[in-house]
Amino acid sequence: MLQTDQIIKLLGKHLNGSLNRQETEALQTWIDAKPENQNLINRLEQNELLIEDIRLYWDLWNDAEATEREQRIFDRVAQKTTILPSPLYKRIHKWVPYAAASILVLASILYLTLQPKKIADTETLITAKDILPGGNKATLTLENGRSIDLNSQQSGIIVGKDITYLDGSSIVDNKAEASEKLVLKTPIGGNYKVVLPDGSQVWLNADSKLTYPSRFAATERIVQLEGEAYFEVQHQHLSGRKIPFKVVSNGQTVNVLGTAFNISAYAEEPQMKTTLVNGAIEIENHSSKNINKMVPGQQAILEGTDTKINKVDVFKSIAWKYGQFSFDDKSFDQIMREMARWYNIKVAYEGGIPTDRFTGNAFKTDKLGTVLRFLESSSIQYRVKSDDNDTYKVIINNTANRR
């Protein structure tokens, strides 16, 4: 039988994702012992408002005049703990007031347990739940070198006679007679959309850069990409002739007439991947000069002089555009590189990079701790610490490789 202090310790480690296999089994045994235990852990995991109540309750403990406010908080917590499946309600409704008190006491201790702690080497330990997701962030650099931090409350810009946000509000008057080179850059933890002068739309993923003109030439449309972007290209004609659209990225040029596709061309990735959603494109490998034609549902993987064309599930490659991570068919280190770009974290490994494979999706709007729950199905443990320049480091402990 687990003692109260042992339960508190296990719950605290569960909430910050640092349980080992033996501790996980012990906690699961305790959870399975009583419905009340499962209800308690569900409330602690799923109800952020409850955690806020707990924090308020803790603040009131040393307030001699807080009796009335304390009772209001207690009542709110008690009300939340009564949200139970109907078959269980009659059996344990008498337990609920005591459950509320137990949650308040136990979770208040947990709240203290989970606060950032200083250890001997002054390293600050935090939990992954403290790390927020990225959002709408980008800078626009003009031909004259002026750099503009774009509004995070907006999701994109339109390049026309003027440069405006998607809602029409002005960013900068851009009435120059000649075409100017513009650069849209998203930082780590940012994404943004741009509608190009021809009406084509481009969504930039985190840590990416798109270079394009304020006006396209009459004979061809050329943009340059570093990082990852999703394109929806408009057909455009001149005197009955289609005007080609070209995307130049690291090692390749994609020739487009009108289509939707995704290019992932991060410098730190071992492969460059182009995924065709609809339409038709040609990919020219800069090293081999070979040209490959693609049809919808195919992905081109460029690595050096080789370009391989494979049939793929398109959504796995464009899930990021729809606010999701896809874990399917990805190595563990690739998954973590995607996390690093979105949550502005660094990743380090103890015991080598895990070879585990995972399936499923997660939402990019969630905090890092929620997304990392996919690790619960494995023996992989992690911890988080503060790093230089106001960033965090996630340290992966691959216990499977240590046995």
Image: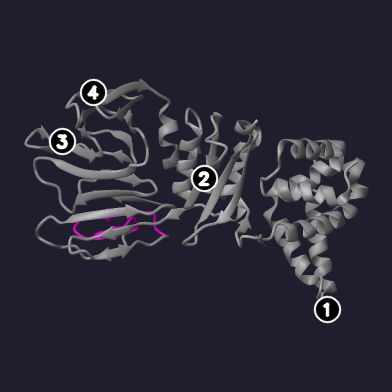
Find the distance from the CA under tag 4 to the CA under tag 2.
Answer: 39 Å
Label 4 CA crowd tier, 10 Å (few <14, some 14–19, many 20+): some
Find the distance from the CA under tag 3 to the CA under tag 4.
Answer: 15 Å
Task: Kindly identify which residue carries mark 4.
Answer: 293
Tag of residue 348? 2
From the viewer's perspective, is the residue at label 2 or at label 1 nearer? 2
From the viewer's perspective, is the residue at label 3 or at label 4 nearer? 4
The amino acid pointed to by label 1 is Glu
Do callouts 1 and 3 mark residues in contact (Cβ within 8 Å)? no
Q: Secondary structure at mark 4?
A: strand
The amino acid pointed to by label 4 is Lys
Q: Is 91 left or right of 289, judged from the image as shown?
A: right
The amino acid pointed to by label 2 is Ala
Tag of residue 193? none
Q: Quadrant of the C terminus?
A: top right
Q: Residue at x 51, y 52 (%)?
A: 133
x, y (%) of residue 318?
41, 36
Task: Kindly identify which residue carries mark 1.
Answer: 65
Task: Kindly identify which residue carries mark 3.
Answer: 244
x, y (%) of residue 228?
34, 42
Do callouts 3 and 4 mark residues in contact (Cβ within 8 Å)? no
Q: Which quarter of the picture shows residue 225?
A: top left
The earlier-in-sequence mark between 3 and 4 is 3
Residue segment shown in magenta: 153-167
